[in-house]
């Protein structure tokens, strides 16, 4: 276009005619002399280059802004399934399964030339052009496309994982990896992002280059269990992604999970036996993510590691606290079996501090690592709390998961005799408390075929975008729809959450069972939570689940050992040192830092293992020096 304009410009036409006449031997006296191009110095050329680059950046930002302005309303206005009963949901599910559009996914459009067979196809970019996949401007050229969940009206009828089993194909996964900016300062792996400091830009680049085994090596340098974090982690790394400043962040969590799952499929994940053993023993109490991470690191250091778990299966929170639809238990058991093949000993049904004295365990081990979690739930002391039908979240989730595993193993009839199973089938359910635990209770109740469900949250409704006091790269405190909320909306036609609500009383019937919940609206003021007069409401409920978090670990072990506690009754151990007030005893995970994420538990388990290993090495060297002195004296 610019070339045509130059050719049709009058001045350029005169110049071309003059040049033609001169070439033919004509006179130049009646023609405009040709315009000479002024030579630019180095400084002028540098300024010109900067102007061009600035204009291109402005144009790119405008293109991204127009795309976001056009696409976001379209995505928000997509029609959701509306149904008012489980029968309606079942009929809609059957229709959806029969429809070929049921599994339709938003992927980048591809194009392959007629004779291209040995490379990836070309991909349509945001600006409409079609070109080969490239990562230089991938965050500008391509849209974020996370791996989708299964349809809500499909997944509420089973206990399978909510993620689609196939995930992205090779082309789309390469496109998503190409969106990584390879930042000079990757905030995604700093303290504002990934707690375990995953080498995110490195494994993204390797996935883009199809070097999957090298990507696995980078991932395992910092993360013992990517198959867990790739499913249940809320991905603070994506909240700190630099691309999220002007666009949607990179799909880091999906790429992480794709790497480890491909590694298992290809047979790259095999037992790693330590080259030598130190002869020193470590007892780890608790087999959650912190305990397993510590056990893995200490075992690779050559120590004899024994993990004690009071439940009948290894995994702690991973096995019984997180529902099967978020993390399949076969994947937890797959990792536990691998650790056992590497030499770690697991002892189940060992309730340390109750069945076994912790002092005896300490006397028979060179070091002890406590990773017992924070299992004391936060209660709600309001009138009517003593009534039946009110349960803590872990009581509800653990019983459900045990029932599922017993059903799978065929031991339900013989093992489930105490009648402690809590069902939401046909009941009006109220879940008090938000967060991941509250969402898991919602999803579990939906699969029980509850009659209705509500979720009370103390805080007000979050804003749709970051507030001024919530800048990047902090975790974005914005309104979102998790898997449980989407399932309720699909079946009952509305979001289950009621924001800014405080429970004031549980209403009991003649049999001392809960039948309703009384609430008042509240807001957060300078003096804290303020109740609003005239906002009293009563909600029908014959099952109430308290999902308000956890306050501290159980005090049995700390009392027996005489350990110091902090002001929140957690085991006192300095962050980064993890040594308790008793020599040779370390603490990590939720029992030290309080209720937190799985990825933080892995981080603390790795840190505690490093400090415990250093302690054991120092102790071994001092023992050798003592024995040497004794031999020399003899």
Image (cartoon, grey):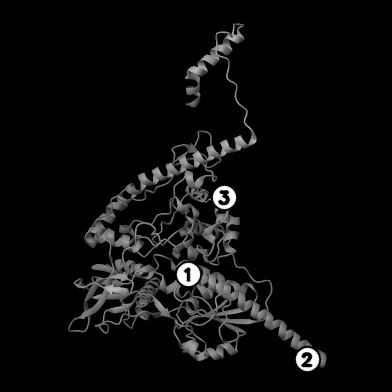
Q: Residue furthest left?
A: 510
Q: Residues within 10 Å of mark 1 (few under 14, many from 20)?
A: many
| In the image: residue 258, left or right of residue 101 | right
Image quadrant holding the C terminus, namely: bottom right
**Residue extending furthest toward the top:** 26
Q: Nearer the viewer, residue 615 or 392?
A: 615
Judged from the image, the secondary structure of the residue bearing numbered disc 1 is helix
Q: Is residue 605 left or right of residue 163?
A: right
Q: Are marks 2 and 1 in contact (CB under 8 Å)?
A: no
At x 56%, y 86%, the residue is 581
Disc 1 marks which residue?
Answer: 598
Classify residue 359 by image quadrant.
bottom right
Q: Are marks 3 and 2 in contact (CB under 8 Å)?
A: no
**Quick one: 205 or 274, which is closer to the camera?**
205
Mark 2 or mark 1: name the one nearer the start of the chain. 1
Residue 81: x and y, percent? Answer: 27, 54
Q: In the image, residue 364 lies at what x, y percent?
A: 60, 88
Mark 3 and mark 2: Cα distance apart in space: 59 Å
> Which marked residue is nearer to the observer: mark 1 or mark 3?
1
Mark toward the start of the polypeptide (1 vs 3): 3
Mark 2, residue position = 630
Local crowd size for mark 2, using a 10 Å CA cut-off: few (<14), some (14–19), many (≥20): few
Question: Disc 2 to disc 1, how far (Cα)?
Answer: 47 Å
> Of residues 491 and 410, which is closer to you in this image?
491
Q: Is residue 429 visible?
A: yes
Which residue is label 3 attached to?
Answer: 210
Looking at the image, is mark 3 or mark 2 earlier in the sequence?
3
């Amino acid at each position: 276009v610019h070339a045509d304009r130059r050719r049709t410009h009058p001045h350029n036409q005169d110049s071309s005619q003059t040049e033609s006449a001169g070439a033919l031997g004509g006179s130049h006296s009646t023609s405009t002399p040709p315009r000479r191009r002024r030579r630019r110095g180095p400084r002028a050329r540098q300024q010109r280059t900067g102007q061009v680059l600035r204009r291109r950046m402005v144009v790119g930002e405008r293109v991204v802004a127009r795309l976001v302005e056009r696409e976001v309303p379209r995505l928000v206005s997509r029609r959701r399934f509306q149904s008012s009963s489980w029968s309606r949901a079942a009929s809609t599910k059957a229709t959806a399964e029969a429809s070929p559009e049921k599994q339709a996914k938003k992927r980048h459009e591809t194009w392959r030339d007629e004779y291209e067979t040995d490379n990836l196809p070309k991909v349509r970019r945001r600006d409409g052009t079609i070109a080969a996949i490239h990562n230089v401007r991938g965050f500008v050229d391509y849209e974020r496309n996370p791996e989708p969940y299964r349809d809500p009206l499909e997944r509420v009828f089973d206990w399978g994982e909510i993620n689609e089993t196939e995930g992205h194909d090779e082309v789309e996964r390469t496109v998503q990896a190409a969106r990584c900016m390879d930042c000079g300062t990757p905030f995604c792996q700093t303290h504002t992002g990934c707690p375990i400091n995953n080498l995110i830009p490195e494994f993204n680049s390797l996935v883009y280059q199809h070097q999957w085994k090298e990507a696995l090596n980078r991932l395992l340098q910092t993360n013992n269990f990517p198959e867990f974090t790739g499913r249940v982690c809320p991905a603070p790394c994506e909240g700190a992604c630099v691309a999220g400043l002007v666009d949607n962040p990179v799909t880091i969590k999906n790429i992480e999970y794709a790497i480890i799952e491909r590694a298992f499929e290809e047979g790259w994940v095999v037992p790693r036996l330590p080259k030598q053993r130190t002869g020193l023993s470590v007892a780890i109490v608790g087999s959650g993510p912190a305990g397993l991470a510590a056990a893995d690191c200490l075992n690779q250091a050559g120590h004899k590691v024994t993990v004690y778990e009071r439940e009948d299966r290894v995994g702690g929170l991973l096995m019984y606290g997180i529902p099967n639809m978020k993390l399949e238990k076969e994947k937890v058991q797959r990792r536990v079996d691998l650790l056992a093949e590497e030499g770690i000993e697991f002892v189940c049904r060992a309730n340390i501090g109750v069945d076994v004295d912790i002092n005896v365990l300490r006397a028979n081990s060179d070091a002890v690592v406590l990773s017992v979690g924070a299992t004391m739930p936060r209660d709600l002391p309001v009138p009517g709390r003593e009534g039946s039908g009110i349960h803590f979240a872990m009581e509800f989730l653990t019983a459900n998961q045990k029932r599922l595993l017993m059903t799978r193993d065929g031991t339900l009839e013989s093992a489930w005799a105490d009648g402690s199973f809590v069902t939401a089938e046909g009941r009006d359910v109220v879940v008090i408390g938000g967060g991941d635990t509250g969402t898991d209770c919602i999803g579990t109740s939906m699969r029980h075929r509850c009659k209705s469900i509500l979720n009370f949250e103390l805080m007000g409704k979050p804003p749709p975008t970051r507030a001024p006091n919530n800048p990047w790269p902090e975790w974005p405190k914005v309104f979102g729809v998790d898997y449980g909320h989407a399932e309720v909306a699909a079946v009952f036609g509305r979001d289950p959450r009621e924001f800014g609500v405080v429970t004031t009383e549980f209403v009991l019937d003649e049999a001392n069972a809960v039948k309703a919940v009384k609430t008042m609206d509240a807001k957060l003021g300078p003096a804290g939570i303020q109740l609003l007069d005239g906002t009293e409401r009563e909600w029908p409920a014959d099952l109430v689940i308290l999902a308000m978090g956890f306050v501290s670990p159980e005090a049995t072990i700390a009392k027996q050992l005489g350990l110091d506690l902090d002001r929140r009754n957690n085991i006192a151990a300095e962050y980064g040192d993890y040594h308790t007030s008793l020599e040779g005893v370390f603490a990590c995970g939720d029992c030290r830092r309080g209720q937190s994420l799985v990825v933080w538990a892995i981080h603390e388990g790795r840190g505690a293992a490093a400090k415990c290993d250093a302690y054991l090495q120092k102790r071994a060297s001092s023992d050798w020096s003592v024995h040497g002195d004794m031999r020399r004296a003899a």
